[in-house]
Image (cartoon, helix red, strand yellow):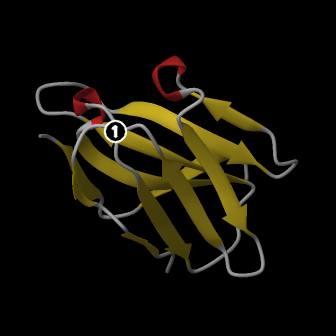
């Protein structure tokens, strides 16, 4: 059974930093972080593929950095210069292609609150 366990969320003032971690029970070719703010749809924050190709939402470019430790099957999201609009539940996503389709796995989510 696939498990994704997130950690590192919390409350921080605007301009502060947080680092999220996602420990996976297996390796995946594609992993990413999504977030959902109250009253809004879940959106992709950042993703990384096997080739270490990264993708970021325009709203976080230059402030957030996604990385992973393949030896530990762990995904990270370093978040700097946090803004109030970064508040939301951040979820780890892992994807693999199996048979004829992509399978998505999700962590339980971790709350990030940016407020003064």
The residue at 56%/48% (across/down) is 32
For this view, does 101 lie left or right of residue 14?
right
- How busy is the neighbourhood of tag 1: few (under 14 within 10 Å), some, or many (20 plus)? some
Q: Nearer the viewer, residue 100 or 82?
A: 82
Instruction: Name the outermost residue toward the top.
Output: 58
Horizontal and vertical percent for residue 102?
Answer: 63, 45
Of 5 and 81, nearer the camera is 81
Number of disc labels: 1
Q: Position of residue 77 (x, y in %)?
A: 53, 53
Left or right of 2 on screen, residue 81: left
- Residue bearing mark 1: 15
Give how far across and how far down residue 15 sits, in percent: 34, 38
Residue positioned 44% across, 61% down in the render: 20
**Nearer to me, 86 or 6:** 86
Locate residue 54: give its quadrant. top right
Assign a secondary structure to mark 1: loop
Q: Quadrant of residue 41?
A: top left
Q: Residue at x 30, y 34 (%)?
A: 86
Does 105 sit above or below residue 57? below
Q: With respect to residue 7, does 63 lie above or below?
A: above
Across and down, in percent, residue 24 comes to 56, 74
For this rendering, which residue is in front, 63 or 25? 63
| Left or right position of 82 against 85 | right
Image vertical order of residue 107 relative to residue 91, above or below: below
Point 30% across, 64% down: residue: 108
């Amino acid at each position: 059974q696939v498990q994704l366990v997130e950690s590192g969320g919390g409350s921080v003032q605007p301009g502060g930093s947080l680092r999220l971690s996602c420990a996976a029970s297996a390796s995946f070719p594609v992993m990413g972080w999504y977030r959902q703010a109250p009253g809004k749809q879940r959106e992709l924050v950042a993703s990384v593929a096997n080739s270490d190709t990264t993708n970021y939402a325009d709203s976080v470019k230059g402030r957030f950095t996604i990385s992973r430790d393949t030896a530990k099957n762990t995904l990270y999201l370093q978040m700097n210069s946090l803004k109030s609009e970064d508040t939301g539940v951040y979820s780890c996503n892992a994807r693999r292609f199996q048979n004829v389709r992509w399978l998505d796995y999700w962590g339980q989510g971790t709350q990030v609150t940016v407020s003064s």
